[in-house]
Image: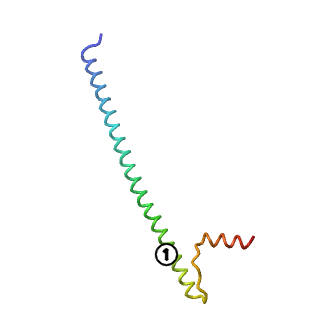
Amino acid sequence: MLKTNEIFLIISISFCISLLAITKAVNVYEYRTLNSLIDKESSKSLASEIKFIEMNNKLLYKKSFLEANKNSNIELAMIKPERTHLIVNKKIR
């Protein structure tokens, strides 16, 4: 039969293990929450950088078009680059 000291030792060890498991679960939850917040912030900043790059490209395209139009004797039609690529491919064939 187990003595009272052994029973007390087993109960205290099981209580400590339960307490450690609970704190571990809480720490993992906090870590995952922090990771998701960091991911959200980085994706927001990445999306804003992409929008900035797109707007900058549009501005540069319009600026180069206006410069070309200013320097030429003929009024140029503003054709987007994808469309120009299709027109050139059709003429080559």
Rendered view: 62 above or below 14:
below
Quadrant in which the N terminus is drawn:
top left
Residue, disc 1? 59
Depth order, front residue of 20/49? 49
Horizontal side of 93 relative to 59 (left or right) equals right
Rendered view: 38 above or below 25:
below
Which type of secondary structure does the marked residue at label 1 adopt? helix
Depth order, front residue of 28/78? 78
**Dividing the picture into quarters, in which one does residue 42 lie?**
bottom left
Rendered view: 28 above or below 63:
above
- Across and down, in percent, residue 90 comes to 71, 70
- Across and down, in percent, residue 25 comes to 35, 37
Depth order, front residue of 7/22? 22
User: What residue do we see at 53% from left, 76% from top?
Assistant: 61
Identify residue type, mark 1: Leu
Quadrant in which the C terminus is drawn:
bottom right
Depth order, front residue of 29/23? 29
User: What residue do we see at 29% from left, 13% from top?
Assistant: 2
Hey, which residue is sitting farthest top in the picture? Answer: 1
Rendered view: 73 above or below 78:
below
- Across and down, in percent, residue 68 comes to 57, 84
